[in-house]
């Protein structure tokens, strides 16, 4: 499934799959936005799939935001794995 990104009031809503086919483009697109805006809010409530590649892309975005002291927020109740992954990253830093 393809990936669609829509923006509304500086919140980027992602729909579709973040997987091996889309993760690199997802990461590149949001890295550009993070650099341009200095803060990033991503709503993943409508994401139907996140595989290990997608999770890694989100983790890299999160780590980059931390390294450059930029705001990074994930909205949505659907993926506890993302929360757990980012929480453990925070503890390790």
Image (tube, rainbow, N blue to C red):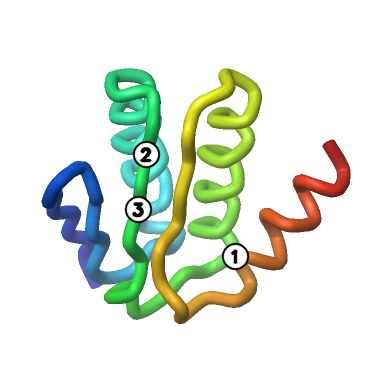
Residue 83 horizontal/vertical position (percent): 63, 65
Q: Is residue 78 above or below residue 27?
A: below
Give the quarter of the image for residue 64.
top right
* Inter-mark Cα distance, 1 to 3: 12 Å
Classify mark 2: helix, strand or loop.
strand
Classify mark 1: helix, strand or loop.
helix
The outermost residue toward the right is 92
* Residue under the point 41% across and 76% down: 49
In-image side of 63 versus 15 (left or right): right
The reply to whether discs 3 and 2 touch (Cβ–Cβ < 8 Å) is yes
Q: Which mark is residue 42?
A: 3
Q: Is residue 71 above or below residue 24?
A: above
- Kindly report which numbered mark, 2 or 1, lies closer to the viewer in this rendering: 2
Between residue 45 and residue 16, name the one nearer to us: 45
* Residue under the point 34% across and 79% down: 48
Label 1 vs 3, first from the N-terminus: 3
Q: Which residue is mark 1?
A: 82
Q: Count neighbours of disc 1 (C-alpha within 10 A) and say few if under 14, some if 14 to 19, many if 20 or more.
A: some
* Inter-mark Cα distance, 3 to 2: 6 Å
Residue 38 horizontal/vertical position (percent): 38, 23
* Residue under the point 60% across and 76% down: 80
Residue 17 horizontal/vertical position (percent): 33, 69
* Residue under the point 24% across and 50% down: 11
Q: Is residue 87 above or below residue 69?
A: below
Between residue 71 and residue 27, name the one nearer to us: 71
* Inter-mark Cα distance, 2 to 1: 16 Å
In-image side of 56 versus 1 (left or right): right
Residue 5 horizontal/vertical position (percent): 18, 54
Q: Which residue is mark 2?
A: 40
The reply to whether discs 1 and 3 touch (Cβ–Cβ < 8 Å) is no
């Amino acid at each position: 499934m393809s990936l669609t990104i829509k923006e509304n009031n500086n919140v980027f809503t992602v729909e579709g799959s973040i997987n091996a086919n889309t993760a690199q483009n997802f990461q590149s697109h949001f890295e550009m936005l993070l650099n341009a805006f200095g803060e990033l809010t991503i709503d993943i409530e409508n994401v139907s799939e996140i595989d290990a590649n997608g999770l890694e892309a989100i983790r890299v975005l999160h780590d980059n935001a931390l390294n450059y002291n930029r705001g990074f927020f994930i909205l949505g109740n659907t993926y506890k794995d993302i929360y757990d992954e980012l929480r453990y990253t925070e503890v390790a830093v």
